[in-house]
Image (tube, helix red, strand yellow):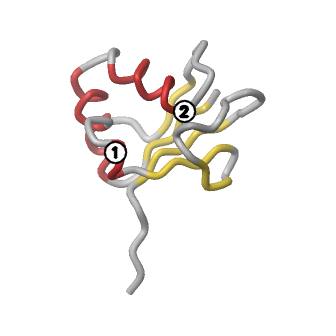
C-alpha cells in the first residue's frame, strides 16, 4: 500500500510517500511497525494523538481495519483561519 506523510510528519520521516508491505490489520498496528523501522519513524509517531489518518482519502481512526486499503495518509490536525 502507499503510505503518505504530510507537514511535520513528512519532515521528520524525510519522504512524502512510500510503498509499504505490511501484515498489519489496523492503522495502529501499521504505526507500531513503522516505529520499529528507524528513529525518524519513532519520532514522527511518538504521539499519535497529535496525528490524523485517512484511508483511501476518507478520514479514519487508528483502530480502523486496513483490509482492502490502498492508501494511508498521516497528517497533523487541520486548523482553520
Residue at image coords 32%, 36%: 45
Q: Quadrant of the N terminus?
A: top right
Q: Secondary structure at mark 1?
A: helix
At which x and y percent is residue 7?
A: 36, 54
Residue at the far bottom: name it: 81
Q: Quadrant of the C terminus?
A: bottom left
Q: Quadrant of residue 32?
A: top left
Contact, CB < 8 Å: mark 2 with mark 1?
no
For residue 27, the mark is 2
At which x and y percent is residue 25?
A: 62, 22
Question: Which badge, 2 or 1, is on the more N-terminal residue?
Answer: 1
Q: Neighbour class for label 1 at 10 Å: few (<14), some, many (≥20)?
A: many
Residue at the far right: name it: 68
Q: Neighbour class for label 2 at 10 Å: few (<14), some, many (≥20)?
A: many
At which x and y percent is residue 57?
A: 67, 52
Height in image: 18 above or below 9? above
Q: Nearer the viewer, mark 2 or mark 1?
A: 2
For residue 48, the mark is none
Q: Secondary structure at mark 2?
A: helix
Residue at image coords 54%, 34%: 3
The reply, left or right, for residue 54 in relation to residue 35 is right
Front-lying residue, 61 or 68: 61
Residue position for label 1 = 9
Amino acid at each position: 500500500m502507499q503510505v503518505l506523510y504530510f507537514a511535520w510528519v513528512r519532515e521528520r520521516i524525510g519522504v512524502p510517500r512510500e510503498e509499504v508491505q505490511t501484515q498489519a490489520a489496523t492503522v495502529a498496528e501499521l504505526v507500531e511497525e513503522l516505529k520499529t523501522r528507524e528513529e525518524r519513524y519513532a519520532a514522527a509517531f511518538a504521539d499519535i494523538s497529535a496525528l490524523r489518518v485517512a484511508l483511501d482519502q476518507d478520514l479514519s481512526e487508528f483502530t480502523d481495519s486496513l483490509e482492502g486499503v490502498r492508501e494511508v495518509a498521516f497528517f497533523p490536525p487541520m486548523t482553520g483561519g
